[in-house]
Amino acid sequence: MFTLVRSGRVYNPQDIGIKDILIVGDKIVRIADHIDLPKSFQVTIISAGGQIITPGLIDLHVHLLGGGGEAGPASRTPEITLSKITRAGVTTVIGCLGTDDVSRTPESLLAKAMQLEEEGISTFIYCGAYQFPFPTITGSIKKDIALIPKVVGVGEIAISDHRSSQMTFDELCHVSAEARVGGMLGAKAGIVHIHVGDGRRMLEPLLQVVKETEIPINQFLPTHLTRTPELLANAIEFAQLGGCLDFTVKGQDLDFPITTKQALQTVLDRGILVNQITLSSDSNGSMPIFNGKGAVIKLGVGEINNLYLEWTGLVKEGFSLTDILTMVTINPAKRTGIHKHKGSLEEGKDADLLILNPDFKIQTVMAKGRLMIHEGKVLVKGTFE
């Protein structure tokens, strides 16, 4: 099947100008100023004149099965659905478990990822959850990462949080080494994705591992870093050593005092590079607010559409389009090791792309060469939507 997208302004995520994009099956095969095909070819032509073409967004922190449970069974958040993902312009998700590894398991997470893949998008997962020892599919973090194609790392591991298992230094070293070697054996990132709570230790457990062992700092990706000014300052210290940072985007249920805009302005002013930063939604995870005694006093849920609202909002507020787009496309692809096929519009890569009008309203979403949304209408829904 041939699809020709004509005359859109292409952000790769760098601005490469007005281009045609030829897609065959699920791959981009040519990007050029103008592409002509023989009249005998059966080709679907999509006009993108006056519009913006970008890579599909990659959300590296999504609770595909839902999350929560901190206030009992009624506080479990729901599973995500296909059209919620695509309406947010997201074409690739990386799924994780959180607090609840009792009623939700890595096997169920893998099955949910496989379901969404069959429905049309690209999916990967982390093994593990908040608590140590971590739940895995094979019984080993190293084996999960090395042998299961969809497993790209371990996470989200909780530190500096009353919901964590309070891992020791040796335990965190061991887990990080398992992930690193598993990644080497499976030719993957072997990322160690870290949930950072509001505890007083902040990122100190990671900094200790980096300073006292041979495990490189780029093995880790901490998230939820806008909880306090002190945590953000600690994150800058981590990044100045060469580490990467993930910021959870704002939403009406996220009660972090520092906005993404404020966090980005701060870290960029301190010399942190754009390629060290990713944005993610924490979609379908719970957003509990605890009192001083650790009891839940408010509940919310993450929404994947916040990723779309945040990146477009930041651009409208004056941030560079290419910089912010980089944080939600090629950077998360590199962090999770899927950049050979994902994260940018290049010949030979998967045909995951968005077409947006000049106000950044999504007109078309294509995932692996298949139109999921076109002219603002959802064409493909999940099996039970």
Image (cartoon, rainbow, N blue to C red):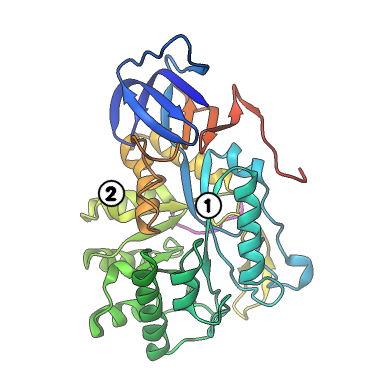
The structure residue drawn at horizontal position 53% and vertical position 52%, both measured from the top left corner, is: 93
Q: What secondary structure is found at the residue carrying circle 2?
A: helix
Percent across and percent down for residue 291 are: 62, 74
Position of 328 with respect to 385 (left or right) is: left
Position of 374 with respect to 205 (left or right) is: right
User: Which stretch appears magenta?
Assistant: 252-258
Residue pointed to by mark 2: 274
Q: Nearer the viewer, residue 28 or 76?
A: 28
Q: Is residue 356 above or below residue 201?
A: above
- From the image, which quarter does the C terminus lie in? top right
Image mark for residue 93: 1
Image mark for residue 312: none
What type of secondary structure mainly makes up the magenta span?
loop
**Residue 47 is covered by the magenta coloring:** no
The amino acid type found where label 1 is placed reads Val
What is the total number of numbered labels drawn onto the structure image? Answer: 2
Percent across and percent down for residue 40 are: 48, 11
Percent across and percent down for residue 270 are: 22, 56
Q: Quadrant of residue 337?
A: bottom left
Q: Nearer the viewer, residue 139 or 362?
A: 139
Q: Nearer the viewer, residue 279 or 6?
A: 6
The structure residue drawn at horizontal position 50% and vertical position 59%, both measured from the top left corner, is: 256
Q: Is residue 304 visible?
A: yes
The structure residue drawn at horizontal position 47% and vertical position 53%, both measured from the top left corner, is: 280
Q: Nearer the viewer, residue 80 or 351?
A: 351
Q: Quadrant of residue 52?
A: top left
The amino acid type found where label 2 is placed reads Val
Q: What secondary structure is found at the residue carrying circle 1?
A: strand
